[in-house]
Image (spheres, helix red, strand yellow):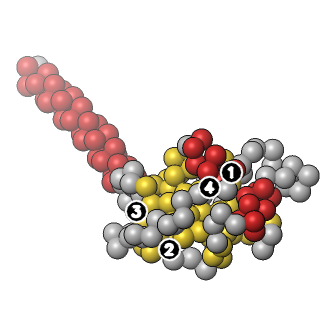
Amino acid sequence: MLALTNKRHWLGRLEWHCTALVVFLTFAVMAGCAAGPYGRLQRDPDVTRMFDTNTVPNGYHYYTTGRTHLPYAIIGIDPRYRFASDDWHAIEPNTQDFAQRVAFIWRPDVWDRLETAKGAWITDSQGNKVGLWYSMYPYTTIIVGPDRRVEVYSPFWPDE
């Protein structure tokens, strides 16, 4: 009887250790995936104001995505990074054309979205600022490689 009790106790402890190990490994894998090359958008009202007042930093390289005069988003990439994307087109900042595109980002009479356009910092997985974002869409996919290569996907998906 004593041997059976010791065996149950030993099996119970083994089961607890296995469960703890599985939980630990699950969190470790999830943390590893989250720390990959993906960046994020960090909302900032100062960035919104820079776009709304046509006073974005001159040193950045600016791009739009969407139709020529109907952009879905405008981004500015820090010159220390290399932008790589076929879906974006260069635009000169702080010009009348730039201001018109910013104004058109949010037009409730044209778009079927009711959110106002907002600005954000584009950051890498470590939180370093790599660029600026302005769009009525609050999300996109951002990849920042170890070689400072930045990819920003268009926020608009026709199937939405």
The crowding category of the residue bearing disc 1, from other C-alpha atoms within 10 Å (few below 14, some 14 to 19, many at least 20), is few
Tell me what residue is drawn at x 45 percent, y 75 percent.
82
| Amino acid at dot 3 | Pro
Mark 3 / mark 1, whichever is N-terminal = 3
Percent of width and height locating residue 116:
75, 45
Instruction: Return the residue at label 2.
Output: 83
Element marked by disc 2:
strand
Percent of width and height locating residue 157:
72, 63
Q: Name the mark on residue 37.
A: 3
Contact check, label 2 and label 3, Cβ < 8 Å:
no
| Amino acid at dot 1 | Thr
Element marked by disc 4:
loop
The front one of 76 and 26 is 76
* Residue sitting at the far right: 109
Q: CA distance from mark 3 to mark 4?
A: 30 Å
Q: CA distance from mark 4 to mark 1?
A: 6 Å
- Position of the C terminus, as image quadrant, is bottom right
The front one of 144 and 12 is 144
The crowding category of the residue bearing disc 3, from other C-alpha atoms within 10 Å (few below 14, some 14 to 19, many at least 20), is some
Judged by depth in the image, the label closer to the viewer, 2 or 3, is 2
Query: Is 105 left or right of 75, judged from the image as shown?
Result: right
Instruction: Return the residue at label 1.
Output: 53
| Amino acid at dot 2 | Phe
Q: CA distance from mark 2 to mark 4?
A: 21 Å
Element marked by disc 1:
loop
Contact check, label 3 and label 1, Cβ < 8 Å:
no
Q: CA distance from mark 2 to mark 3?
A: 14 Å
Residue 158: which quarter of the image? bottom right
Q: Name the mark on residue 55.
A: 4
Query: Is 86 left or right of 131, judged from the image as shown?
Result: right
| Amino acid at dot 4 | Thr
Element marked by disc 3:
loop
